[in-house]
Image: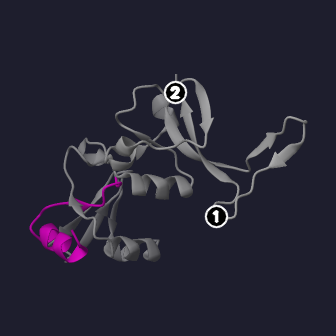
Amino acid sequence: MNFTKALRQMKKGIPMKLPSWGGYWCWDNDTNTIIVYTKDHQRIDIRETENVESTLHNVLSDEWISADGENCSILGGVPAFGFGDAIKYIKRGFKVKRLGWNGKNQHIELAKNISYISPDGVVTNCNHRAIGNYAIAFVGTSGIQMGWLASQADMLADDWVFYKEEENAE
């Protein structure tokens, strides 16, 4: 839903969030403003936000949902998002995975500065006019697969989450 509808829900006492958030926003009747509850359990008056551009970007989103114990980490859930957001996040340097992937430590990430050794021993740096020197790397139980291709199921799934190494350490 858009922010206007989300704000109406907040004023009814329903916490709202964007799908990838671990926290949420809610309306405070005493101060007549939005209070931001971050994934790190901070409580911030929206008027005191440090990143105004990011806050405005969030306000312009049409993807607002209600926050609950299933989709919000500070309420006990796991925030998940779709494949389009997963691609957006890996371009920003995050690692992501699907909740449904079985292997320990499996995730995808953006690989940069890719090179290879040709059959005659020459090291060649990859470069493509459209994508430059980048590829999606799948890190799995058998190692790293460069140039990973998403399946139809991966592209249509809404169970993408941020990969956190400390949660997956052996």
Q: Say left or right for 17 vs 101.
A: left
Amino acid type shown at disc 2: Ala
Say if the magenta span includes residue 10: yes
Q: Secondary structure at mark 1?
A: loop
Q: Is residue 115 visible?
A: yes
Q: Quadrant of residue 76?
A: top left
Q: Is residue 30 visible?
A: no
Give the class, few, some or many, for how many residues have Cα within 10 Å of label 1's Cα (few <14, many ≥20): few
User: Residue 23, how many percent across, how many down?
Assistant: 31, 54
Say if the magenta span includes residue 6: yes
Q: Residue at x 56, y 45 (%)?
A: 109
Question: Mark 1 — residue?
Answer: 130
Give the magenta-colored segment's residue range.
1-21
User: Residue 110, how many percent across, how many down?
Assistant: 59, 49
Q: Say left or right for 138 vs 124.
A: left
Q: Residue at x 30, y 43 (%)?
A: 78
Q: Secondary structure at mark 2?
A: loop
Give the quadrant of the N terminus. Answer: bottom left
Which residue is nearer to you in this view: 8 or 105? 105
Question: Mark 2 — residue?
Answer: 169
Question: With respect to residue 44, does 8 lie above or below?
Answer: below
Which residue is nearer to you in this view: 39 or 128? 128
